Each structure stands twice: as C-alpha cells, then as structure tokens.
Amino acid sequence: MERRPLLAGNWKMHTTVAEAEELALAIAGTPIPADRDVMVAPPFTALAAVRRIVADSAVLLGAQNVCWEEKGAFTGEISPPMLKDLGCTLVIVGHSERRHVFGESDAMINRRATGALRHGLIPVLCIGETLAERESGQTFQVLELQLLGGLRGIPPAEAERMVIAYEPVWAIGTGKTASVDQAQEVHFFVRGLLAEMYEKNIATQIRILYGGSVNPENIDALMSQDDVDGALVGGAALKAESFRRIINYKR
Ligand code: PGA
C-alpha cells in the first residue's frame, strides 16, 4: 500500500510571532504537490497566528508536545483540547530534546501519545539512539525499547493513524545525517517491529519519517528509500527556501 509522504517542520524554540507569521506566509504560499502532506510545528506561542495563515492552505498545523490530561493543575503544560482548539491535527511526542534535556521517559511519552489519540490528534512519536548507543551496538535494542514503551496499550486501530519519526540523536542539529543505508536499515527494522506488535497490514500503513540534519541536498536520496515515508526537519525548516525544496523532493 502507498503511504502518503509527510514533510514536517519542527521549529523548536524559534520564532517570535512576527517571525513565525513571515515563515508561515512563505510556506503557505508554496504550491504543494498533491501526493504529499506538509506540516509545520511552531512554538505554542505562535500556533494561533500561524493557524490564521495556513488555514486556507494545504499546510497542516502541528504542536511540539502535549499533556495527557484535559485540564487541571498542570502548570506549564498544554492539553489536547487546547491544541485542537488552535487547529492542530498532529503533535510531536518524545522528541530527543524532550527525552534528553527534559528527562521525559518512555512511560511519560506513552501517556502523551495516548492522550493525543484520545482527542483525535495524530502523535508523531520520535525515537532514536545516541552516538554512544550506536557505537556500542545497542541501536536496535534502544529503538525497540522506545517503540514498545511509547506504543504500550495503544490498540491497532489507533496505532495505524500514528506517525513514527526515527531521529538518531547524533544527527540532530549536527549537520551529520545518517547515510541513506543507515536510515533504510533502521526504518525497515522499525516496520518489522510494528508488524510483530500489530499486524503486517497495520505496519505497512504507518508512516516512518527520518529526522536529523535533513536538508535540500540529502532529501531526494533519503526519500528514494523504500521505508522512508517523509522527514522531520529542524534547522532547514526555519528557512522558507530550504523547506520549500524539501517539500518538493523528487524520488
Ligand atoms: P535538525 O532537527 O533537522 O535541525 O537536525 C531535526 C529534529 O530535531 O527534529
């Protein structure tokens, strides 16, 4: 089955509202080929402004994290209904910066993904090994634990709507990209795990994005791999021109 590619921009902790509007305008004005999805995930503070700009375009709005609770005493958190209210359809969970800078565990990330699904948001679940883990031959073991932990208790009908993003920590923001073979090897492994956890026909529907220094120069080669269904882009998504080229990748 054909998976619809997803090109996603993660703006991280960048952009004032004015800067976000400028970037969103440039992206919303870009014609998007009909066979693919495009998402931008601005910081929470710019979601309302970006929504107004992308509302009439094909660009999907995503957030960078979400709480599992609907409301209550959870200072600093944002709930799924709040994101829905702002027009978000997707939300990133388990980004490596959440895991490694803010100490989020697989159990917490699982709660975030589950909470998002409960409210009809599509979680983009990020997994990825550190350099030390790769060098000590633990890559597959680490990814398996993150995937099992992140998807715990999520039934097949929900899992098939999710997006997985493989982001090797050593490739994020470093300018070092995984080789296309390394990316394909891991994506193939992840799809195999999904087939074991669910069923083959579910695994073949789940989109697996690659993330980590994706740029206009390497996007075509990455997208040429069978199991690479899109990209989660940080730095290169902050410049309209480079994100535009990524959106218009050629296989
Ligand atoms: P990068 O970030 O493209 O700047 O490496 C990717 C990400 O962290 O999602």
Image: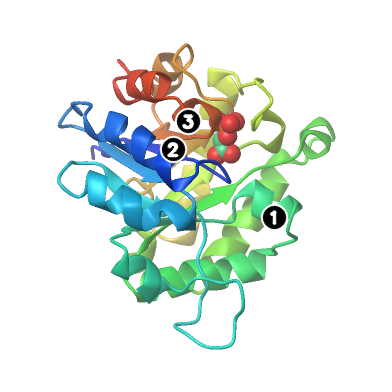
Q: Secondary structure at mark 2?
A: helix
Mark 1, other Cα within 10 Å: few <14 / some 14–19 / many ≥20: some
Residue receiving disc 3: 238
Residue receiving disc 2: 19
Disc 2 C-beta below 8 A from ligand 1: no
Rendered-image quadrant of the C terminus: top left
Mark 1 or 3, nearer chain start: 1
Is 58 drawn above or below residue 176 in the view shown? below
Q: CA distance from mark 1 to mark 3?
A: 22 Å
When asked about the image quadrant of residue 14, the answer is: top right
Rendered-image quadrant of the N terminus: top left
When asked about the image quadrant of residue 231, the answer is: top left
When asked about the image quadrant of residue 199, the answer is: bottom left
Q: Secondary structure at mark 3?
A: loop
What residue is at 60 percent from the left and 71 percent from the top? 76
Does the rendering let one see residue 161? no
Is 103 drawn above or below residue 204 in the view shown? below
**What's the mark number on residue 3?**
none
Amino acid type, mark 1 = Arg
Q: CA distance from mark 2 to mark 3?
A: 10 Å
Residue receiving disc 1: 99
Q: Position of residue 157 (x, y in %)?
A: 31, 67
Is 94 drawn above or below residue 188 in the view shown? below
What residue is at 47 percent from the left and 72 percent from the top? 114
Q: CA distance from mark 2 to mark 1?
A: 27 Å
What residue is at 42 percent from the left and 31 percent from the top? 228
Q: Residue furthest front?
A: 18
Q: Are marks 2 and 1 in contact (CB under 8 Å)?
A: no
Amino acid type, mark 3 = Leu
Question: Image quadrant of ligand 1?
Answer: top right
